[in-house]
Image: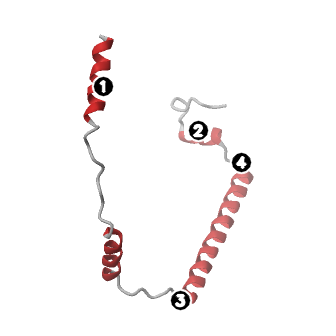
Amino acid sequence: MKKNQEQWVDEVMGSLQGLQSAEGNPYLHTRVLARIQQQLPDRQPVQLKWVYAMAGVFTIMLLLNVMGWSNSSSADNASGVDIETVINEYDTDNSYTSLP
């Protein structure tokens, strides 16, 4: 059985010896680049005022999110809302089983 497998492997590996490696077109890269440049219109650079505007909007949104998050976390701690309160309020004693 082992000899048959080894013989089959040798036959398969021997069948690859007659193959030649594929040759590519040496000018393919330049043709592709030329076609890409033909199809792309001239691009206009982004004006610096729009970059600053988007950075400002992003900063304002980030600050609003941080302020809202900090206000909501401090409000939750002040009112005493915790998992037991939520369980008792929504009467989910039977379906929630992973209490610490």
Q: Nearer the viewer, mark 2 or mark 1?
A: 1
Provide the residue designation for mark 1. 10
Q: Nearer the viewer, residue 95 or 70?
A: 70
Disc on res. 87: 2
Identify the residue under disc 3.
47
Say whether disc 4 or disc 3 marks the residue closer to the N-terminus: 3
Residue sitting nearer the eye, 92 or 8: 8
Amino acid type of the residue tagged 2 in the rendering: Ile
Identified by mark 3, the residue type is Gln
Q: Secondary structure at mark 4?
A: loop
In the rendered image, residue 77, in percent from the top left (x then y), is placed at 73, 51
* 86 sits left or right of 79 in the view: left
Q: Amino acid at mark 1?
A: Asp
Residue at the location (66% across, 61% down)? 69
Label 4 Cα neighbours within 10 Å, binned few <14 / some 14-19 / many ≥20: few
Circle nearer the N terminus (2, 1) = 1
Mark 3 burial class by Cα count in 10 Å: few <14, some 14-19, many 20+:
few
